[in-house]
Amino acid sequence: MTLWSITVLCALAALGVFGVWVFVLILGPNRMFRGTVVERAYFWVTESLPSKIERWARGSVGDAVAARAEQVWIVLFGRRNPLFQVIAVALYWTGVAVFFTQAAPYIPNRYVSSWQWLPIGTTLVANIGCYIAACTTDPGIVDDRNVDSACRLFGYDKLLYFERDCRTCKLRKPARSKHCSACQHCIQMMDHHCIWLNNCVGLGNARWFLGFLATFSIVCFYGAYLVGTVVMEQRHLRGLVSGAVVWDEWGQPIQLSFKSSILYILDDCPLLAVLFVLLLILAPAIGVFTAYQLRITMLGYTSNEESKWVNIADAIKDGVVFAIKDGSHEEAIRVIEKEDQGDFDSQLCRPITHLHQVPNVYDRGAWNNLKFVLHPARSKLHLL
């Protein structure tokens, strides 16, 4: 095995580990993975592993060095930091440069026509534009100037959200908002803080984030397809299509199969090979994440609220969630701790046994939920 082959295998292994890590961090808290190895891996990565590393560091290098390392960790991951944004942009433009230098000279070819440049250019411009907008648009920061209007946007369901003040901002906390320790603000309808954007994803820029994911998925899938046609074109240009023969370093002829001819081309064009493999890995990963974000958007909740629904599911298992009838005989879902259940009339309390029995009051139907995220300023559908 050559040094280049070993390098490629190591790079692929690193990309695979990174892809699994991202998958676990993003989808680990999802309800669909409850009780699975994905959920267990999520808790291991986010809780068990950091605590083990901290104990090892304090025991090996001392408390002072460990405290300094913790400060560096907070600067990198606990505060807004452009480092990962710069890395993302650098990797993106490196990939674009490799495509235009290694693949573009062979487009059009016998598999794709010259009109392919229209969707290529359109998708790249849309993707870059959505990324810039997602990075620079106010995600929905709550301050003393807009806190009243933010609190009127969504009502408090008294299950996921209660009327109270933010302990950090010292302002009223709007329903569906969350305080971001990195941005140091409460964010309206916060989804998550994205280190690749160096910004939160919230009410103000969720549409641009969805647009970025959708166009980036197209870039990855379409890019992999185009690079694949270039590899196939290289088979024709090098005479490796039928009866393919190459010569080894001792001058002996080698008959190449289809698979061997592809590997031969990739070995001879290392930059094209790395781009091709990277796109093949990214395309399904970004596609799955895009589908997940679109799904929760159309179901009327955010990834931040996903964890809240997980807590409700746990409370249901503990037998502390009830549907309570009020004076108007309408039911409201409430959590009643076991020590307080004796204070309620059992005739008016119906125990909830499954999460599907708990309505999401912020869900106004898939199409209306999507329209609200795409055009929040034009819609008042989520007012309770």
Image (cartoon, grey):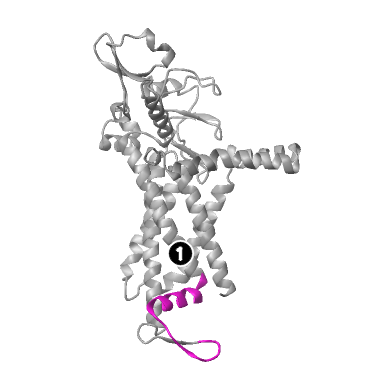
In this picture, residue 36 sits left or right of residue 352: right
Residue that extends furthest to the left in the rendered view of this protein: 329
Q: Residue at x 43, y 73 (%)?
A: 105
- Looking at the image, which residue is at 52% across and 91% down? 251
Residue nearest the viewer, comparing 89 with 63: 63
Residue 79 in view in this figure: no
Mark 1 is on which residue type? Val
- Helix, strand or loop at disc 1? helix
Q: Quadrant of the N terminus?
A: bottom right
Determine the residue positioned at 56% across, 23% down: 168
The residue located at (53%, 43%) in the rendering is 195
Q: Which residues are magenta?
A: 248-270
- The quadrant in which residue 374 appears is top left
Q: Residues within 10 Å of mark 1 (few under 14, many from 20)?
A: some
319 lies above or below 126: above
Tell me if residue 163 comes above or below residue 314 in the rendering.
above
Image height check: is 98 above or below 20?
below
Where residue 140 sits in the image (x, y, percent)? 45, 32
Nearer to me, 382 or 144: 382
Q: Residue furthest bottom?
A: 251
Give how far across and how far down residue 222 sits, in percent.
36, 61
Q: Specify whether residue 252 is painted magenta.
A: yes
Does the rendering let one see residue 315? Answer: yes
Which residue position is annotated with label 1?
A: 277
**Vertical relation: 152 (above or below) 356:** above
**334 left or right, relative to 168:** left
Find residue 323 and report its horizontal and vertical position in percent.
30, 18
